[in-house]
Amino acid sequence: MAAILEKSKLEGFVPHRSRMFLLDRILDQDTDGWKATSQTDITENFMFYDKSVGGAPNYSLFECAAQTAAAITGLYAVAHGIPLRPGFVLTVSGMKFSVPAVEVGKTVTVQAERTDAIGPMYSFTAHLFTSDTKAGFNAPRTEIGSLKLTIYDSAVAETMGGEE
């Protein structure tokens, strides 16, 4: 298990900035295994905060999974001397949630892993959990959802001679 990476150390691995940059930390990572566990604390400052549900609507949480996949891809690139380039989400599928929203004061934990790759296109499976933010990093978690993402990695496409 690698050291915890806080938000300030992750900014170079995810193309978003300011409020759109949702990850608060990476708890663990396995760059060669293409997997990581991230956390996002839900506050009233969360980009997708919705006062009517008192937190983050479930549909907005796919972005936490997408940013976790971006972080995995970026961490892999740095570890293997590949230039960092932005990628983008091609598909989101199989998105299922057992809750309508995650309320303020909870932490969303995403466990994401690359499950397939075809050239510069990567498929990731993500499982999402919640826990009480005040309970810390290793608080008991409850699974609330899962989804699959396919992303396009422009750095890999470039090394393959592909067009952006």
Image: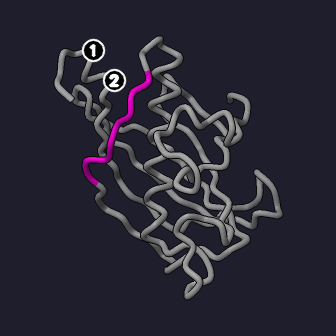
Determine whether, in the image, residue 63 is placed left or right of residue 29: left
Label 1 with label 2: CB-CB less than 8 Å? yes
How far apart are labels 1 and 2 at the CA level?
6 Å
The three-letter code of the residue at mark 2 reads Ala
- Residue at the farthest front position: 18
The vertical placement of 1 against 39, above or below, is above
Compare residues 141 and 49 and report the one nearer the observer: 49
User: Is 24 left, or right, of 93 in this rendering?
Assistant: right
Is the image coloured rainbow, by chain, by secondary structure, or in one colour? one colour
* Residue 155: numbered disc: 2
Q: Which mark is residue 159?
A: 1
Quadrant in which residue 140 is drawn: bottom right
- Determine whether 32 is above or below 46 in the image: above
Q: Amino acid at mark 1?
A: Thr
Image height of 120 relative to 39, above or below: above
Q: Residues within 10 Å of mark 1 (few under 14, many from 20)?
A: few
What secondary structure prevails in the magenta region?
Answer: strand
Q: Is residue 43 magenta?
A: no
- Residue at 53% of width from left, 27% of height from top? 75
24 to the left or right of 146: right
Q: Quadrant of the C terminus?
A: top left
The span picked out in magenta is 84-91
On whether residue 85 falls in the magenta region, the answer is yes
Tell me what residue is drawn at x 82 percent, y 62 percent.
135
**Residue for point 67% across, 42% down:** 7
Most extreme residue toward the top is 81
The quadrant of the rendering that contains the N terminus is: top right
